[in-house]
């Protein structure tokens, strides 16, 4: 299918004609007006013979002049046609298999650097635990559409819903604490996930929230955003990351410090899951992934969808080449247009 991407540029086609009539005085006309006041009356006994000897009919334009004008018109039409961006559209149909729509919202605030987990006797950060837990979960979701949201002081969509789960896993591996700011906009992350899922078919909208439950930034309160998710039919499965210790170690400026404001608010996370018909799990629970997978498997899958996209192939080279050929041909007719000799 052929189309112009910028068809409105066609309004430039009559521009040379408008300029010609908007600029009425040509050089020869200007000379005639200057001589208008210098004319004198000529008395002649045979005016009819004089008129016959000097007819006032304008001579025809030479063939060179017509060629010159045609080349100028061809040059302008080619330039305008290239500006209109002609393109050939080739249809491409993509068929997706049945599956679920899973949006992952991962906490990437400063608190995710806390060292309150131990793996094989070695202290690890909350972010390392999240990457391990969610990496295994993503690997199991073959055929599902998975998206990724990270949030700190603000929320960002790192990946839209896609079947390429390996790409999502690579993006998750590259996330570091504080990449989205120092705070935790928990409510904003839920609201952003709802926004991305609400256009998907019902009964398959799932938001998996990984956070420490301490909301400290953003414009949405977590419970308010959870009510919004419930209205939109989005189930939220929450994975709590962190401990309830009073003093939690965290690496700051290369030094391990102990802080008392990094505790996990499990009550908020549990309420979010309950309001939306989801469930709450702890990141340290090895059965959490199996339970989430079982719960998701009980939902209704999105039916297979066929989506047709048009791939555009630009064709501007053809009218631009035509304009260039006309420009080169103009050099073959240097005397094609009328010249005005000034004395």
Image: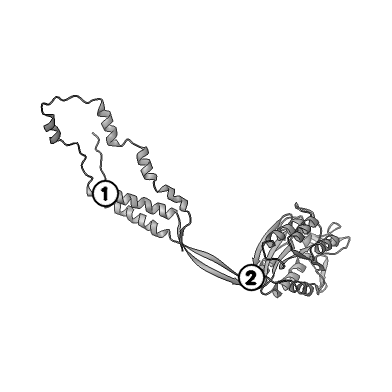
Of pointers 1 and 2, the one earlier in the residue sequence = 1
Looking at the rendered structure, the secondary structure element under dot 1 is helix
**Residue 310 pos. (x, y %):** 52, 64
For the question of whether residue 112 can be seen, the reply is yes
Q: Residue furthest front?
A: 48
**Residue 239 pos. (x, y %):** 79, 66
**137 relative to 268 in the view: left or right:** left
**Residue 231 picture quarter:** bottom right
| Residue drawn at (77%, 68%) of the image | 129
| Disc 1 packing (10 Å; few <14; some 14–19; many ≥20) | few
**Residue 133 pos. (x, y %):** 76, 71
Relative to 91, does residue 9 appear above or below in the rendering? above
Depth-wise, is mark 1 or mark 2 nearer the camera?
1
Looking at the figure, which quarter contains the C terminus?
Answer: top left
Mark number displayed over residue 15? none
Which of the pair 202/213 is nearer the observer?
A: 202
In space, the residues marked 1 and 2 are separated at their CA atoms by 61 Å
For the question of whether residue 334 can be seen, the reply is no
What is the tally of numbered marks visible in this picture?
Answer: 2
Looking at the rendered structure, the secondary structure element under dot 2 is loop
Mark number displayed over residue 66? 1
Relative to 224, does residue 90 appear above or below in the rendering? below
Relative to 84, does residue 15 appear above or below in the rendering? above
Q: Residue furthest right?
A: 246
Which of the pair 114/66 is nearer the observer?
A: 66
Which residue is under mark 2?
164
**Residue 209 pos. (x, y %):** 76, 64
Mark 1 and mark 2 residues within 8 Å of each other at the beta carbon: no
Which of the pair 155/303 is nearer the observer?
A: 303
Q: How is the image coloured?
A: one colour
**234 relative to 88 in the view: left or right:** right
């Amino acid at each position: 299918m052929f189309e112009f991407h910028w068809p409105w540029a066609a309004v430039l086609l009559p521009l040379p004609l408008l300029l010609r009539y908007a600029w009425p005085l040509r050089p020869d006309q200007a000379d005639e007006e200057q001589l208008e006041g210098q004319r004198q009356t000529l008395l002649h006994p045979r005016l009819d013979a004089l008129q016959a000897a000097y007819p006032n009919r304008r001579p025809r334009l030479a063939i060179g002049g017509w060629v010159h004008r045609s080349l100028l018109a061809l040059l302008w039409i080619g330039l305008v046609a290239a500006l209109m961006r002609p393109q050939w559209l080739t249809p491409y149909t993509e068929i997706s298999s049945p599956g679920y729509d899973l949006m992952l919202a991962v906490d990437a605030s400063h608190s995710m650097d806390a060292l309150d987990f131990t793996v094989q006797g070695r202290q690890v950060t909350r972010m390392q635990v999240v990457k391990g837990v969610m990496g295994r979960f993503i690997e199991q979701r073959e055929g599902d559409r998975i998206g990724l949201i990270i949030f700190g002081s603000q929320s960002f969509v790192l990946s839209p819903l896609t079947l390429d789960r390996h790409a999502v896993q690579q993006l998750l591996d590259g996330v570091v604490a504080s990449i989205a700011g120092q705070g935790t906009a928990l409510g904003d992350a839920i609201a952003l996930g709802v926004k991305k899922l609400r256009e998907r078919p019902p009964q398959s909208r799932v938001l998996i929230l990984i956070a420490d439950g301490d909301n400290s930034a953003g414009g949405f309160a977590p419970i308010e955003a959870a009510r919004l998710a419930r209205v939109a039919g989005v189930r939220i499965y929450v994975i709590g990351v962190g401990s309830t210790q009073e003093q939690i170690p965290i690496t700051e400026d290369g030094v391990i410090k102990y802080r008392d404001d990094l505790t996990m608010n499990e009550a908020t996370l549990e309420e979010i899951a309950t309001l939306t018909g989801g469930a709450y799990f702890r990141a340290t629970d090895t059965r959490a992934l199996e339970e989430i997978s079982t719960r998701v498997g009980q939902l209704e899958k999105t039916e297979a969808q066929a989506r047709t996209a048009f791939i555009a192939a630009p064709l501007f080279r053809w009218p631009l080449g035509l304009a260039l050929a006309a420009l080169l041909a103009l050099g073959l007719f240097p005397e094609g247009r009328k010249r005005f000799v000034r004395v």
